[in-house]
Image (cartoon, rainbow, N blue to C red):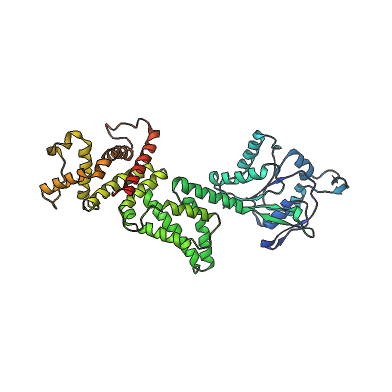
Amino acid sequence: MARKVFLSVLGAGFYDKCKYSKERECFCSSETRFIQVATLECLKANDWNEGDAVYVLLTEKARKLNWLTSESGKRKKYPDGLEDYQGLEDELKKMDLKVCNKIDHDIPNGSDENQMWDIFKVLFDLIEDGDELYVDLTHSFRYIPMLMMVFCNYAKFLKKIKVKSITYGNYEDRNDGIAPIVDITTLSVLQDWTAAADEFLSTGNVNKLSRLYMPQIHERLRYSLGSDEEAQLLKSFVNNLNSLVNELKLCQGKRLIDACTINDTKQSIDEIEQVEKPKPFEPLLNEIKKSVQAFDNQNNVKNGIAAAKWCSDNGLYQQSATLLQESVVSLVCELVGLDWRKEIKRKYVNNAFNILADKTKTDNKKEWNVPSDSDFDEEERMRILELIMSLKEVQELWKDFSTLTAYRNKINHGTMLEGQGQFKNVDTIADNIKNLAERIYNLTYCTSL
C-alpha cells in the first residue's frame, strides 16, 4: 500500500496563533501557531498508519526559533517583549500521530544554485516509489515553492508518486481569527496536462492523456450510474483516439484507408467540442483536431499517405517508411484500375518501379519480371506494366520509391541481413524519411495522384 507523506518547510518567523479553515471540507482547525498542525488535522493524519511519514524541512535558523522550544518556553515578539511559545516539535508530539516517520530534516538556506540542488536531493531521497504526497508550501521561502512544484512533477515520472494535495495557509486573509487553507493542487494537475499535451504533440502518443483523463470520466460514470451522456461521449473520444493512434503505430493500412476509426474519431471530436471539459484539455483538443484534419473520413487510399506523414511528423520513421511505400503502391493500383487489396495486383506496381530503377532492364522487356496473374494473358500483363511505367506520377516517384525500399528493408531487418550494409549516417535517415513523406504527401494532394 502506498505511503501517505506530508511534506512541509518550516520558516523562522514569529507566528501568531489562529485557526485555519477549509470550506470545501467544512473543516476548522484547533488554534495553533503552525500551519503544519492545522494541515495535518485537515488531512486527518491521526488516522494514518505507522508506515506513513511526516517530513518537516528546517534551516538552522528555523530549527532554533520554531522547531525547538526554548528553555524558557518563551520567544521574543518584537516589539512586544516575550511571549509563551512552544516549538513545532512539541506541538506535533501533542498530536500523538501514529506515523513512525516524524522526521525533522535539515536543509541549507538555499543561498546559491549548489544549495538549491542540495535541497532537491534531500527531497528526492525522502520520497519512495509510489508515495502519495501532501505538500504544504506556506512557509517555503525564496524559490522553494517553485522548487517544490518542479520536484513534484519530476518525482511523478521517476518515482511514480501521486500528488494528492498542495496547500498553503493564507494567514494574511484571516477573518475573526480564522485563516483559509488554500488548495493549489490544480497547479500540479496542470503540469500533468502539460505533460500529456507535450507527449501528444511530440510523439502522437495519448497514453498520458488516457491515464490522466479516464479516471475522471469513470468517476463521473460511477457517480451517475452510467447515465452521464457527456461522460460517455468523452470516454468514446479517448477510446477512439487511442484506437486511431494504435492503427498508425501498427501500420494498419487497410483500416486507415477504410477510415472507420478515423470517422469515429472525427465524429467524437465534433461531439465533445460543446461538452464541459477541464480547461487545460481545450487547447489540446484543438491540436488533436488539427492532427487528424488531413485524413478523409470516407474510404480513401490517400489516407495511407496522410498516415505516413503523420507518423514522420511524430517521430515514427519506421512506420512512416512502411506506410509510405505500401500506400504509393495502393495509389498507383487505383490509378490503373487494379484492386490494391490483392497481392498479385500490387506486384505489377512493385515490379514496374523495380524495372524503372534498373536501367539495364528498362529497355529490355525480356528481363522484365511479369506477374503470373491468371486474370490476364501475357500480352495484357505486359500492357499493364507498360501503362504503369508510363504514368507521369510513377516517373516522378520511382527514385523516391527506390530510396524508400532501401530504407525500409534495412530498418525492418535491423540491418542484419548478409550483404546489407549499415547506414553511413544514422542521424540523417530520420530527416530523409521525413522529407520523403513530405514530398510524396505534397505530390499526392497537390496533383491528380
* For residue 215, side relative to residue 166 (left or right): left
Residue 252 seen: no
Q: Position of residue 329 (x, y in %)?
A: 26, 47
Judged left or right of residue 419, residue 308 is: right
Q: Residue furthest top?
A: 424
- The answer to which of 331 and 129 lies nearer the viewer is 331
Relative to the observer, which residue lies in front, 143 or 438? 438
**Identity of the residue furthest to the front in this view:** 447
- Residue at 75% over, 51% down: 34
Whether residue 403 is visible: yes
Expressed as whole percent of the image width and height from the top left, the position of residue 390 reads 20, 43
In the picture as drawn, the residue positioned furthest to the right comes out as 81
Point out residue 347 in the picture as x, y percentages from the top left corner.
Answer: 21, 46
In this picture, residue 202 sits left or right of residue 300 = right
Residue 387 to residue 296: above or below: above
Front residue of this view, candidates 37 and 187: 187
Q: Nearer the viewer, residue 372 or 296?
A: 296
